[in-house]
Image (cartoon, coloured by chain):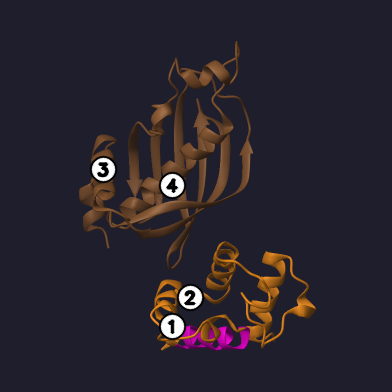
Amino acid sequence: MSTTFDTIANIIAETCDIPRDSIKPESHAINDLGIDSLDFLDIAFAIDKAFGIKMPLEQWTQEVNEGKATTDRYFVLKNLSDRVDELVAAKGA
Amino acid sequence: MRLEYFMLIDRVVRLDLGAGSITCEAKVPDNSTIFEGHFPGYPLMPGVLLIECMAQTAGWMLVAAHKLQRMPFLAAVKDAKLRSFVTPGQQLLTEAVLSHSGSGYAMTEASISCEGKLVCNADITFRLTGFPTPGFATEMRKRAEAIGLPISEALTND
């Protein structure tokens, strides 16, 4: 059974044509993998579909813009995986 | 259609926010300066305007779905297929369905048909933001009323 990170990494590899081996849990989607905001919409779409959730991108963006959170919290992939796990858990609660 | 003003939707025929779908009518004008260049002696509706027409169809659906509080801006067009020529005077039926409503974005599938035949289709992505200016929102509301977007349904739909 694949982990949340594996699923997200596979989505990124396929969506952005990035070699799967270069996508690590500590990779930052923007700073390390060079994913821009438009490409991230495709990733968000695929993640939303794969996990049956709706990632609150607007809320996350607002938190970053207001200095309440760093981009690491949402764009380092191991952290993104944690956020997705939280959303999946909240959906089932 | 008023091609020069990018007013490509004439009338909303059906809006179903529950199902996430919209159908509109759009008649290609008999005359337009655009046809003088596209193409001289062989007027064709430009493919880019067909794509814009599909985007406006999906866009009106999103405007309604978000109760005229958010503006969909075109972000991506994928798998656009222009299947046959469209000429002046043709009556088009434009349709769109919502394939995913994300946070700050939406994915749609749109198409145009003429006399029952599929003319073009594409997957279209939008970014959704608040209206940048109050005047813009006002003008969009006026335009929504002009094309018969069922605003009351949009405002009461949850």
Marks 3 and 4 on same chain: yes
Give the residues drawn in magenta, as a range: A77-89
Q: Which chain is brown?
A: B
Sort mark 4 into few (<14), some (14-19) or many (20+) by Cα contacts within 10 Å: many
Label of residue A91 in the image: 1
Q: Which amino acid does label 1 sit on?
A: Lys
Point out residue A42 in the picture as x, y percentages from the top left corner: 58, 64
Image quadrant containing the C terminus of chain A: bottom left
Using the image, name the chain to which the residue with label 3 belongs: B
Q: Distance between the residues labelled 2 and 3?
A: 34 Å
Identify the secondary structure beneath mark 1. Answer: helix
Between B96 and B76, which is closer to the camera in this rendering? B76
Spatial distance from mark 2 to mark 1, Cα to Cα? 7 Å
Res A38 label: none
Q: What element carries label 4?
A: helix
Q: Gap in Å between the C-alphas at discs 1 and 4? A: 29 Å
Q: What amino acid is labelled 2 in the image?
A: Ile
Q: Chain A is drawn in which colour?
A: orange
Mark seen at residue B139: 3
Pointers 2 and 1 in contact (C-beta within 8 Å): yes
Which residue lies under the disc numbered 4?
Answer: B58
Residue A53, which numbered label?
2
Kind of residue at disc 4: Ala
3 vs 4, front mark: 3
Q: Disc 1: which chain? A: A
Q: Which chain carries label 4?
A: B
